[in-house]
Image: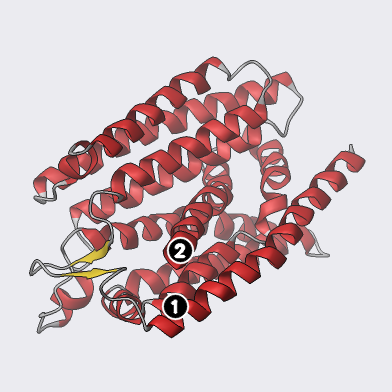
Amino acid sequence: MVITFLWASICLYLLLGGADFGAGIIELFSGKKNEQHVKRQMYKAIGPIWEANHMWLIIAIVILFVGFPGIYATVSTFLHIPLAIMLIGIIFRGTAFTFRHYDAVKDDWQNVYNKIFRISSLLTPFFLGIIAASTVSGAIDRNATDFLSAYIFSWLNFFSVAVGLFTVAICAYLAAIFVIGETTDSKQRNYFTRKAKEAILFVVLSGALVFVAAYVSSIPLIHWIFGGNIGIVAILLASLSLVTLFFNFNKGRPNILRMLAGFQIVMILVAATYSHYPNLILFKDGGYLSLIEHAGGEKTLQGLGWALLLGSVFILPFLIYLIYSFKSKSLEHH
C-alpha cells in the first residue's frame, strides 16, 4: 500500500505539477503578440490545480523520509545540489505567480515576475528529470572520495541531462493539451493545438536523445523498456493513445484529450520503471537500494500505510471540491 501511494503521488505530481510547470514553459516560448492571451488561458487551465499540486510532491517526500529512510538519505545526500535548485525554483515560481496576479500595483515589476515565473517553470522540471534519471543511471558513487565524484558527476552527465530535457518536453505537452479545453475561441484553440503539436515533436526528439544518451552511457534502457511484455504493451498503448489524440484534436473533446495525454505519461512511466522494480536507486558499483529490501520497520510501515489511507479519505474529496470551486468560479466569470 505504501509503495502504491508513493508511485501514485509521483505520477500525479508529474501529471498535474507537470501541466503547471508546462504553463510557464508555453508562456516562455510564446511571442509578444500572443503573450497576454496565452497568460490568461494558462491561468485558467492551471488555476484549479495550482493550489494543490505540490501536495503530491510533499506526500512522496514524506513517504520516503518515513518509510524508506535509507533511500531518502541517499537521494538527499548525493543529489542535494539538483534538489536544492529544484526546490528554489518551486519557491521562486510560486512567489512570482502570486505577485503577478495579486500585486495591487501594476508596474514594471510585472515584467520581472513574468520572467521569474517562466524561467523557473523551465528549470524546475529540468532538474526534476535530472534527479529521477540520476537514481537509475548508475552514476551515484557511494564510494567516492572527492567532491566532484560524489556530488557533481552523480547527476551532471549526458543521460540525466537528456531525461531533464525530456521532462521539460512532457510538461510543455501536458500544459498545451490541458489548455486546449479552456478556450472557446477558434483562433486561440488553433494556436494552442499548434503548440501541442510542437510539444509532441519536442517530446519525440528529446525521447530519442534519451535513448542515445543511454546507449552512450551503457545504460540498458532499451532492455528495461523492450525486454519484457509489460514494457512493450505500455509503449504500444502510449503510441496508440497518441494516434487517437491526433484524431481528436479538432473535435471539441478536451476531456478526452486530457485523459489520453495523461494515459500516455502513465504508460511511459510504467515502461521505464517496471523492469528494475523494486530497485529505486542503482549505484555505480552495481549495488542498489530496494523498496522491498531497504524499507523501514514493519510497525513504521503499518502506521504510515494507515495514515496514508485515512488521509486520502479526508484529502481527496476536498481536492475534488477545490477543483470544482475553481471551475464554477470560472464559469460564473464568463
Amino acid on which disc 2 is placed: Leu
Identify the residue at horizontal 49%, vertical 76% (top origin).
Answer: 62
Judging depth in this view, the residue of 12 and 66 nearest the camera is 66
- Estimate the spatial distance between the alpha carbons at disc 2 and disc 1, rounded to whole Å: 12 Å
What x and y, as percent, mark residue 224? 20, 45
Judging depth in this view, the residue of 44 and 282 nearest the camera is 282
Where is residue 125, by image quadrant?
Answer: bottom left
Kindly identify which residue carries mark 1: 301
Dot 1: element: helix
Q: Above or below — where is 291 with respect to 248?
A: below
Amino acid on which disc 1 is placed: Leu
Identify the residue at horizontal 55%, vertical 63% (top origin).
Answer: 56
What x and y, as percent, mark residue 165? 34, 47
Kindly identify which residue carries mark 2: 6
The answer to whether mark 2 and mark 1 are in CB contact below 8 A is no
Residue 122 falls left or right of residue 27: left
What x and y, as percent, mark residue 10? 46, 58
Q: Residues within 10 Å of mark 1 (few under 14, many from 20)?
A: some
Q: Residues within 10 Å of mark 2 (few under 14, many from 20)?
A: many
Q: Above or below — where is 60 with respect to 165?
A: below
Where is residue 280, by image quadrant?
Answer: bottom left
